[in-house]
Amino acid sequence: MHTLTRRIALLLATFSLSTLLSSGVAHAGHGHGPGKQDKQARMCERLACTAAQQTQIKAIHDATAPQVKAARDAMRSLRDQQRAEWQRPTPNAGTLERLDGQIDAQRDKIGDLRRAAKLKIHALLTAEQRTKFTAEKGRRGKPGKGRKSA
């Protein structure tokens, strides 16, 4: 009986470990969606970028990413402050309005950073690549989560 219990325990431990490892591998590299490197690679593949263009595009993204992250982190902090203000017995309208303005400013900053990066990328591309790049950007931006309809 003691041997049977050990075998069952070993079987359960092996099964649990294999499940844990397979779920870890399945989700490796997945945070909030495809990573920037994956997006860059797919974009360069669709546009048939040269090696030099790929290097330059990566440098643009690498330079922009920390600034976008800082603005997102600031926006997250402001939203936390906003939530805390709303949880007060009597929220201060002035404080909420100020926080709204600061959140909008961070959102605008992120948009400006992304637009500047796209303009830099656009300048690197050939005329044919620009046509494809512009067509891709035209497909996006349909109203959905977080986007205003026209």
Image (tube, rainbow, N blue to C red):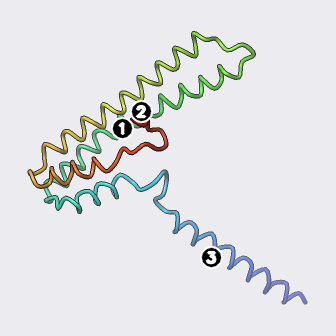
Secondary structure at badge 1 equals helix
Residue at the disc numbered 3: 18
- What is the C-alpha distance between the residues marked 1 and 2? 6 Å
Going from the N terminus, do you reach mark 3 or mark 1 first? 3
Q: Is residue 43 left or right of residue 65?
A: left
Q: Which residue is mark 1?
A: 66
Query: In the structure shown, which secondary structural element does the residue marked by tag 3 occupy?
Result: helix
Q: Of marks 2 and 3, which one's residue comes earlier in the chain?
A: 3
Is residue 104 or residue 11 the one in the foreground? 104
Q: Which mark is residue 70?
A: 2
Name the residue at 72% across, 18% down: 88
Residue at (68%, 79%) from the top-left corner?
A: 14
For the C terminus, which image quadrant? top left
> Which amino acid type corresponds to the residue marked 1 in the rendered image?
Pro
Distance CA(mark 2)–CA(mark 3): 38 Å
Disc 2 is placed on an element classified as: helix
Q: CA distance from mark 3 to mark 1?
A: 36 Å
Q: Is residue 68 left or right of residue 56?
A: right
Residues at discs 1 and 2 in contact (Cβ within 8 Å): yes
Label 2, residues with CA under 10 Å away: few <14, some 14-19, many ≥20: few
The quarter of the displayed image where residue 149 is located: top left
Q: Quarter holding the N terminus?
A: bottom right
Residue at 13% in and 50% down: 125
Residue 73 in the image: state x and y as whole percent.
Answer: 48, 33
